[in-house]
Amino acid sequence: MTELARAMASLAERLEGVLDRMLPHEDAPERGLVEAMRYATLDGGKRIRPFLVAQSAALFNVSENAALRTGAALEMVHCYSLVHDDLPAMDDDALRRGKPTVHKRYDEATAILAGDALLTRAFGILASDSTHSNPSVRCELVAELAKAAGHHGMVGGQMIDLTAEHTDFDIGAITRLQRLKTGRLIDFSCQAGAILGRAPVGAREALRGYTHDLGLAFQIADDLLDVEGDAKTVGKAVGKDAEKGKATFVSILGAEQARDQASRLASQAIAHLKPFAEKADLLRELAHFVVNRKH
Ligand code: GRG
């Protein structure tokens, strides 16, 4: 096992405990809602965003409690977005993280409400003085996550994805869409560490450069996995998104150029980490992992 794999597994284990405690337990009187929230969030996923929070927080000697609670809040927002993205009105998917999607396991109304409740719980966690004693830090976390997740961020990206004419997409249009849809939450991950650690402007800018390139590399790798998964399981080198008529980095660039572009972006991402010297080694390794991952 590499040092990165060990660190990611250890973070995932500690995060699971925090998520378990932060999610509600009692499912009465709103039967099924709490169960669906827990089903959507616990025991799944790579936990890349909380790992980025923890690693960026570690650059500024932030307490583990603050980093894990912030990572848990961010993971809840990510899980809500997946639950809603899987709904019939959006991507209409039956499987997520190897198990039935929330609307298949429960029903559509429960999936919508479980997503809503995860989103609101996340902001409650960030606003709590158990996350950070300084109210201006808490306020900045709330404001930045609201921007990243909202209409000028992830939700705005999703809206463009649903309504844009994908046949007209060029590399600029797909990049702008993905910067919002997946990039902004990845940006927030490292900004959260910097906010918790009251990092200076230069350090924040360096981390912003890192996640800007990492987020795009992550999305290109996701598009490549989509195609490679299809080629293996269905025998077609198309990918689920392209089959749904969606433009992807692979449909625009072709697989080979997309792979080169992802590697270039990972190297660019790593170059931004110079000011942090060896303290950022796991963030460097993560950039390689993101483009070489198999799931
Ligand atoms: C519905 C408001 C709303 C937003 C949806 C992020 C998003 C916007 C949809 C996700 C759809 C999707 C599969 C996008 C591709 C890239 C991506 C975000 C993949 C899932 O993230 P991972 O790989 O997943 O980190 P795990 O399961 O490991 O957490």
Image (cartoon, helix red, strand yellow):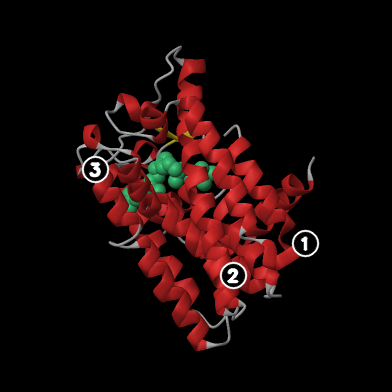
Say which residue appears at 32% left-offset and 63% top-offset: 150
Q: Earlier in the sequence, mark 2 or mark 3?
A: 3
Q: Which of the 4 image quadrants contains residue 59? A: bottom right
| Mark 2 or 1: the one toward you | 1
State the SS at label 2.
helix
State the SS at label 1.
helix
What is the three-letter code of the residue carrying label 2?
A: Gly
Is residue 25 something that shows in the picture? Answer: no
Ligand 1 within 8 Å of disc 3? The answer is: no
Q: Which residue is mark 1?
A: 278
Q: In the displayed structure, does residue 82 sit left or right of residue 247?
A: right
What is the three-letter code of the residue carrying label 1?
A: Glu
The foreground one among 69 and 228 is: 228
Say which residue appears at 64% left-offset and 69% top-offset: 57
Mark 2 nearby-residue class (10 Å; few <14, some 14–19, many ≥20):
many
Q: In the displayed structure, does residue 63 sit left or right of residue 70?
A: right
Q: Split into 4 quadrants, where in the image is the N terminus?
A: top right
Residue 155 x/y as whole percent = 31, 55
Say which residue appears at 70% left-offset and 67% top-offset: 276
Q: Relative to 52, say whether 144 is above or below.
A: below
State the SS at label 3.
helix
Q: Relative to 216, say whether 126 is above or below.
A: below
Q: Which residue is mark 2?
A: 193
Say which residue appears at 19% left-offset and 43% top-offset: 163
What is the three-letter code of the residue carrying label 3?
A: Leu
Mark 3 nearby-residue class (10 Å; few <14, some 14–19, many ≥20):
some
The foreground one among 259 and 85 is: 259
Q: Relative to 236, say whether 38 is above or below.
A: below
Q: Earlier in the sequence, mark 2 or mark 1?
A: 2
